[in-house]
Image: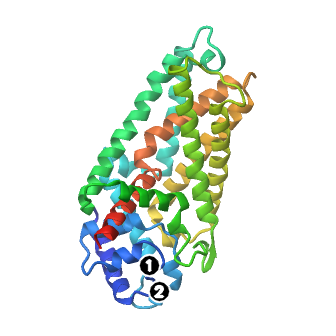
């Protein structure tokens, strides 16, 4: 990891540890104040524990023009971004996509092109619904590797992270606390419960928290839709297409709506936010990937609406191209933050238990 980023984060963490004004703001400060000196692993843990709510920045008396020039949200965001690049597998891909919105767009275009080629070369003969455009076997052969690769890549990255931060064996109690924190987005509520300052300087709102929840639960509902459809196909002998009031359709439609609303709101918030309080080099990549995730939801909804029409084949290929790009980019883009944040919260649960 970049030494200069770690040194700056260490300088600011030591000043914060001496001040302690922000003690109850989020999970970062109790973890920070438990240390007297900060190793690279400590700083990496603090960086991934930080949710960039920015409340500490607007409360701080040592920000510029004070000579200490504290900007802890940015310092931790830079270390966090750098850690994702360093732990990514393969590392070269992490460095390419984390900060590069253009590369994400190009990868999406390539995904579309591959699906267009597959739709022409592997077209189904006599299939029903989506399978009339691309056979079931062709879909499985394309998307199974695309689904397994990010799982393997993320697992390697998390192992590297866990070794760096000195993680201990995980118990159910650690997972329970981390999952509860994520489910409620507790660290986006602020220590006072009024929300965070991401949107408009010192005005506390829950807007960012709600947008994150919409994205997270929307994604989980879409994943549940695909999982239920897979079980229905292989275990119950009920292949697609499914009716509007079937479990896959209900889960998919609700998840798609939440994804579109959440991603749209997050892009809007990011464009309005103060870019100097985050990882400025990664802004384009974050916007591009959030847009891609929202487009996955939107194209899925349009595909539902176009079922049985002449628009369906083209929309199917566009949607599947977006999904393919999303899966392949997941370990190297903003999507990876969810996995690392979960690991950071589990590690923090271990710290609190030890205390």
On the picture, is 229 further left or further right than 175? right
- The residue tagged 2 is 64
**Depicted 260 relative to depicted 22: above or below:** above
On the picture, is 129 further left or further right than 327? right
**Depicted 224 relative to depicted 342: above or below:** above
Residue 168 visible? The answer is yes
Q: Nearer the viewer, residue 193 or 28?
A: 193
Residue 343 visible? The answer is no
Most extreme residue toward the front, as rendered? 173
Give the position of the C terminus as an image quadrant: bottom left
On the picture, is 232 further left or further right than 352? right
Q: Which residue occupies 63% across, 15% down?
A: 132
Between the residue at mark 1 and the residue at mark 2, the CA separation in whole angstroms equals 8 Å
Position of residue 256 measured from the top left corner of the image (x, y, whole percent): 64, 42
Quarter of the image for residue 35 reads bottom left
Q: Which residue occupies 40% across, 29% down?
A: 145
Q: How many marks?
A: 2
Position of residue 100 measured from the top left corner of the image (x, y, whole percent): 46, 52
| Mark 1–mark 2 CB contact (< 8 Å) | yes
Q: Secondary structure at mark 2?
A: loop
Q: Secondary structure at mark 1?
A: loop
Quarter of the image for residue 89 reads top left
Quarter of the image for residue 239 reads top right
Q: Nearer the viewer, residue 89 or 203?
A: 203
On the picture, is 29 further left or further right than 126? left
Position of residue 137 measured from the top left corner of the image (x, y, whole percent): 49, 17
Q: How many C-alpha atoms fall within 10 Å of the one at disc 2: few (<14), some, or many (≥20)?
A: few
Q: How many C-alpha atoms fall within 10 Å of the one at disc 1: few (<14), some, or many (≥20)?
A: many
Give the position of the N terminus as an image quadrant: bottom left
- The residue tagged 1 is 71
Position of residue 287 measured from the top left corner of the image (x, y, whole percent): 55, 55
Q: Which residue occupies 36% across, 52% down?
A: 95
């Amino acid at each position: 990891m970049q030494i200069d980023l770690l040194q700056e984060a260490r300088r600011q963490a030591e000043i914060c540890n001496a001040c302690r004004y922000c003690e109850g703001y989020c999970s970062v400060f109790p973890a920070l104040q438990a240390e007297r000196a900060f190793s690279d692993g400590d700083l990496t843990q603090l960086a991934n524990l930080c949710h960039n709510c920015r409340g500490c920045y607007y409360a701080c008396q040592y920000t510029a023009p004070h000579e200490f020039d504290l900007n802890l949200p940015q310092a931790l965001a830079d270390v966090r971004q750098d850690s994702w690049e360093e732990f990514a597998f393969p590392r070269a891909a992490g460095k390419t996509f984390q900060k590069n919105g253009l590369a994400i767009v190009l990868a999406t275009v390539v995904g579309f092109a591959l699906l267009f080629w597959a739709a022409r070369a592997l077209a189904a003969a006599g299939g029903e619904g989506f399978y009339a455009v691309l056979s079931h076997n062709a879909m499985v052969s394309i998307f199974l590797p695309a689904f397994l690769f990010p799982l393997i890549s993320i697992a390697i990255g998390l192992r590297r992270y866990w070794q760096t931060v000195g993680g201990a064996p995980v118990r159910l109690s650690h997972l329970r606390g981390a999952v509860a924190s994520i489910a409620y987005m507790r660290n986006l509520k602020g220590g006072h419960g009024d929300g965070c300052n991401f949107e408009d300087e010192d005005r506390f709102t829950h807007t960012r928290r709600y947008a994150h929840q919409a994205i997270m639960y929307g994604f989980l509902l879409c994943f549940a839709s695909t999982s239920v459809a897979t079980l229905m196909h292989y275990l119950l002998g009920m292949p697609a297409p499914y009716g509007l009031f079937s479990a896959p359709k209900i889960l998919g439609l609700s998840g798609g709506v939440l994804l579109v609303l959440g991603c749209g709101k997050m892009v809007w918030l990011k464009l309005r936010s103060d870019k100097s309080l985050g990882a400025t080099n990664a802004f384009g990549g974050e916007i591009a990937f959030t847009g891609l995730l929202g487009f996955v939801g939107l194209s899925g909804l349009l595909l539902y609406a176009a079922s049985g029409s002449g628009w369906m084949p083209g929309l199917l290929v566009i949607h599947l191209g977006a999904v393919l790009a999303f899966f392949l980019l997941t370990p190297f883009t903003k999507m990876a933050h969810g996995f690392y944040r979960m690991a950071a919260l589990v590690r923090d649960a271990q710290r609190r238990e030890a205390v």
